[in-house]
Amino acid sequence: MALSKKLQNFSIGIDMESIGRFKKLDPIKDKIFLSKIFTKKELKYCFAKKNFARHLAGRFAAKEAVVKALYGAGQKKLNYKDMEVVNEKNGAPQIIAGKHNDFNIKISLSYCEDKAAAIAMLIA
């Protein structure tokens, strides 16, 4: 049975990160590392939170999930800084994918005590 054309342009990505991996990051001391992955807006948002590591881990997981979904759709040149995780007015996460905005990408984040997980769904 052949897939419909719509389903042929569908891709997903998933990622899970340990929150502990982000607990020792410092916005000044680790500025070079952080600036390779996160936008200024993301860093400002995360470090304004009491549990900043949770938010960093969630955004990193979201970007990893989007990268995997884009790679599954044939995109090869990917950069974390080309995308930004923002919150809609209702608090739901949204991805702004920069040069990959020709794709419809939806993300969902989930957390437990020590893990952050994300899934990305891409429809071309």
Image: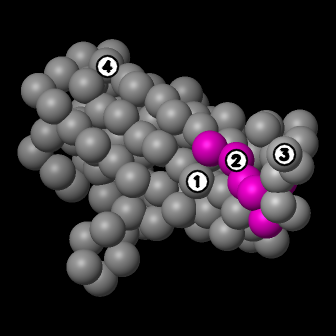
In front: label 4 or label 1: 1
In front: label 1 or label 3: 3
Reading the image, the residue beneath label 4 is 18
Query: Does residue 57 appear left or right of residue 33 in this picture?
Result: left
Which quadrant of the structure image shows residue 57?
Answer: top left
Residue at position x 54%, y 49% in the image? 120
Distance in Å between CA atoms under marks 1 and 2? 6 Å
Q: Are marks 4 and 2 in contact (CB under 8 Å)?
A: no
Reading the image, the residue beneath label 1 is 121
Task: Say if the magenta span includes residue 17.
Answer: no
Distance in Å between CA atoms under marks 4 and 1? 22 Å
Q: Are marks 1 and 2 in contact (CB under 8 Å)?
A: yes
Query: Does residue 91 appear left or right of residue 101 in this picture?
Result: left
SS label for mark 1? strand
Instruction: Give whichever of discs 4 and 1 has the lower sequence position.
Output: 4
Q: Residues within 10 Å of mark 4 (few under 14, many from 20)?
A: some
Distance in Å between CA atoms under marks 1 and 3? 23 Å
- For the question of whether residue 90 can be seen, the reply is yes
Instruction: Give whichever of discs 3 and 4 has the lower sequence position.
Output: 3
Which quadrant of the structure image shows residue 7?
Answer: bottom right
Reading the image, the residue beneath label 3 is 1
Instruction: Give whichever of discs 2 and 3 has the lower sequence position.
Output: 3
Q: Are marks 3 and 4 in contact (CB under 8 Å)?
A: no
User: Which amino acid does the dot numbered 1 rest on?
Assistant: Met
Q: Quadrant of the N terminus?
A: top right
Highlighted range, magenta: 6-12
Instruction: Give whichever of discs 1 and 3 has the lower sequence position.
Output: 3
Query: Does residue 17 appear left or right of residue 53 in this picture?
Result: right
Residue at the front extreme of this rendering: 1
Reading the image, the residue beneath label 2 is 11
Task: Say if the magenta span includes residue 10.
Answer: yes
User: Which amino acid does the dot numbered 4 rest on?
Assistant: Ser
